[in-house]
Amino acid sequence: MKKVKFLVILSGLFLLTACSFSTKSSGTNQDNGGVFVSSNKGDTWRQMPYMPTISGTPGNISGIDINKMVMDPSDSGAVYLAMVDGGLYYTYNVANGWNKVSALSSDVTVNDVAIGSQNKCTLFAAMSNKLYKSIDCGRSFTQAYFDNNTGVTILSVAVDHYDNNIVYLGTSRGDVLR
């Protein structure tokens, strides 16, 4: 009799551990991702996921994963978003929405972005094993560096604050390049 009780309790525990609970509400297809902004020191927050489109219906970045958010060192209103499989986005005023950098493919992963402190139109974007540079505020990009090993990823990029000609890269191999 004790064995039967033990087996019933044990099977009940297995049944309970196999159940899953969800806190998502059904019937709402609203994504709660993206960027949130506070204008009152964090007392209240509002989501700012929108971007203009040709159709007039605003696009939405709330479903795209963000790798990194970078502020322009010389303009606090300029913010860049390096996206996972979504390219690069920017805004010069978060309240007006986000814009896609069309000079880069929209399906690439941008690992990091850096902005020159002396020239805000100088941008660097790290993607895969390559570093791209723009000198015209992201309207066009040229390849500035690539690693011969396609298994290596450039994970971070930084521009020297005093000399925008000096750029540092961090790679998945553990290298810091200048």
Image (tube, grey):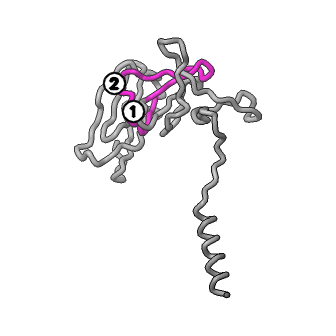
Point out the image quarter for the C terminus.
top left
Q: What's the residue at 60%, 65% (across, down)?
A: 17
Q: What's the residue at 38%, 18% (across, down)?
A: 139
Is residue 15 at all visible to an observer of this figure? yes
Element assignment for label 2: loop
| 31 on left or right of 39 | left
CA separation in Å, label 1 and label 2: 9 Å
User: Within 10 Å of the Cα at label 2, are there few (<14), some (14-19), or many (20+) other Cα atoms?
Assistant: some
| Quadrant of res 132 | top left
Report x, y in % for residue 113: 44, 34
Report x, y in % for residue 35: 59, 32
Q: Which mark is residue 141?
A: 2
Q: Which mark is residue 125?
A: 1
Task: Please check the rendered image and state whether residue 162 is part of the magenta-colored stretch, yes or no.
Answer: no
Type of amino acid at the residue the image marks with label 2: Phe
Tell me if label 1 and label 2 are in contact, CB under 8 Å. yes
Could you say which is closer to the camera, residue 8 or residue 112? 8
Please tell me how many numbered marks the rendered image carries.
2
| 63 on left or right of 19 | left
Task: Please check the rendered image and state whether residue 113 is part of the magenta-colored stretch, yes or no.
Answer: yes
User: Residue most toward the left?
Assistant: 148
**Residue stretch in magenta:** 88-116
Report x, y in % for residue 151: 28, 48
Could you say which is closer to the camera, residue 57 or residue 84? 57
Type of amino acid at the residue the image marks with label 1: Ala
User: Within 10 Å of the Cα at label 1, are there few (<14), some (14-19), or many (20+) other Cα atoms?
Assistant: many
Q: Is residue 100 above or below residue 24?
A: above
Q: Is residue 169 above or below residue 58?
A: below
Report x, y in % for residue 141: 33, 24
